[in-house]
Image (cartoon, rainbow, N blue to C red):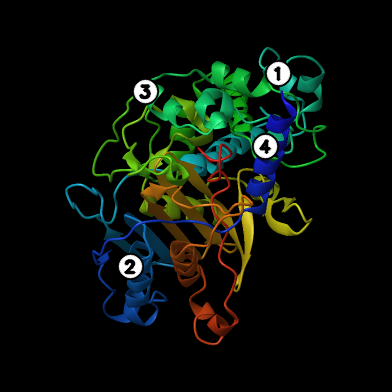
Amino acid sequence: MELAQQDRNRRLRGAAAAAAVVLALLAGAAPAQAAAAPPAGPAAAADALDRAALTRALDAVHEAGVYGAYASVRDGRTHWSGATGLADRDTGRPTAPGMRHRVGSVTKSFTAVAVLQQSARGRIGLDRPVADYVPDLLPGERGRKVTVRMLMNHTSGIADYIGGAFPSLMQNSTASLDEFRHRTLTPGRLIALGTVQPQLFEPGSDWSYSNTNYVLLGEVLRKATGEDPEKVITRDVIRRAGLRDTYFPGTTERIKGPHAGMYENWYGLIDPPRDYADYNMTWGGTAGALVSTTDDLTAFYRALFQGRLLPAEQVRQMRTTVPVKDPGGTVVMRYGLGLLSLDTPCGPVWGHDGAVFGAGTSAMTTADGARQYAVGYNLMKYQRFDAGGKPVPHPADAALGAFALRALCPASDGARSAAAPKPLPEPLDSLPVKGLTR
């Protein structure tokens, strides 16, 4: 690998670790549509959701430049869902609450839960070498040094396969996105694209986000159960959580049911942004292929943090984190086992986010499992960079952060809002190359 390429990769990893706040482009104006009428009678007094404020905050995301968005918020037994803007840029079709959406690396939380369920049954040891399960996929000394836990918290040092799967992106071209739209990739091929690259660091000594880790975890799950990992996750996680609109698409390119177009701008290289809603998502697999809704995502994290999917010990393991630092050494977030944790004005929140071609997602819960939010939006990589390679602030960055804070920390308005709380970071893999699934 040339020195220039090595330097580029280091800068990309640093940018992802910093989780800089950048999310946006374009404009239009369609009002948010609210679903789920306010409760009546005694329930109204206990309703902790300011539905009008949530609707205004979601509208602001569209007004700031995102084509369309849909979101859900839960607090106890109360629930709100809304939508804003356009599902189809060309026809003007509006978004609607409950639309299905590609959720990218939110998939990792589901995969992690399935692995931890098997760990609770004694079939997978978190601190056992990966080679104990899949020696052919991670052979030699590396397979003995990397543990299952290191895959789960991204301390393995194994490189991401994204650059190999979409090679034109490394040459500042988006040709691969169209060339490989209909391609089917096996888990073994994805893993090979990641493991053929040099080890980024000694296993366990640092942190670097890698989709290869979670495709490997899928294969560990296959070995432990003797079943297809997507089938295991569907039965033991998705169905157990009671989710009705979440599924792995396999090789089916079109999303089932109502959904929006998913527009990719790739930092201005695709102008106007192109719709990638129809796509063969085998390149995401157990790292990022799930289709879901914001209602299902809030229900999932609620079930997880209320102890309905894992025993208490496995939840504790999942919430044991490593720090993620920016190039200056500042901790910008913490990463556990398929979960990230962020500090907010109302305390730490947990969950994950995702980024695929044309679609972004964030889903978080308070630590006590009482309140959840999820948002999906259908315009990606609209941000720009200055001559020094730093992201240029955009109004939608602030709008998405403000919506997240309104959803998770309603009391951060008023007195707390005067302190201008820091927005939530953007998706881990929304920056160049380090940003296609999450």
- Report the amino acid beneath label 1: Leu
Report x, y in % for residue 76: 44, 67
Q: Earlier in the sequence, mark 2 or mark 1?
A: 2
Residue 8 image label? 4
Q: Nearer the viewer, mark 2 or mark 4?
A: 4
**Would you call the spot at circle 1 few (<14 residues within 10 Å), some (14-19), or many (20 or more)?**
many
Report x, y in % for residue 185: 47, 19
What distance separates the C-alpha of mark 3 from that of mark 1? 26 Å
Report x, y in % for residue 361: 45, 50
Q: Earlier in the sequence, mark 4 or mark 3?
A: 4
Decide: marks 3, 1 in contact (CB < 8 A)?
Answer: no
Residue of label 1? 138
Q: Earlier in the sequence, mark 2 or mark 4?
A: 4
Residue 59 image label? 2
Q: Nearer the viewer, mark 1 or mark 4?
A: 4
- Classify mark 1: helix, strand or loop: loop
What distance separates the C-alpha of mark 2 from that of mark 1? 47 Å
Q: Residue furthest bottom?
A: 415
- Report the amino acid beneath label 2: Asp
Q: Is residue 35 visible?
A: no
Q: Is residue 70 visible?
A: yes
Residue of label 3? 251
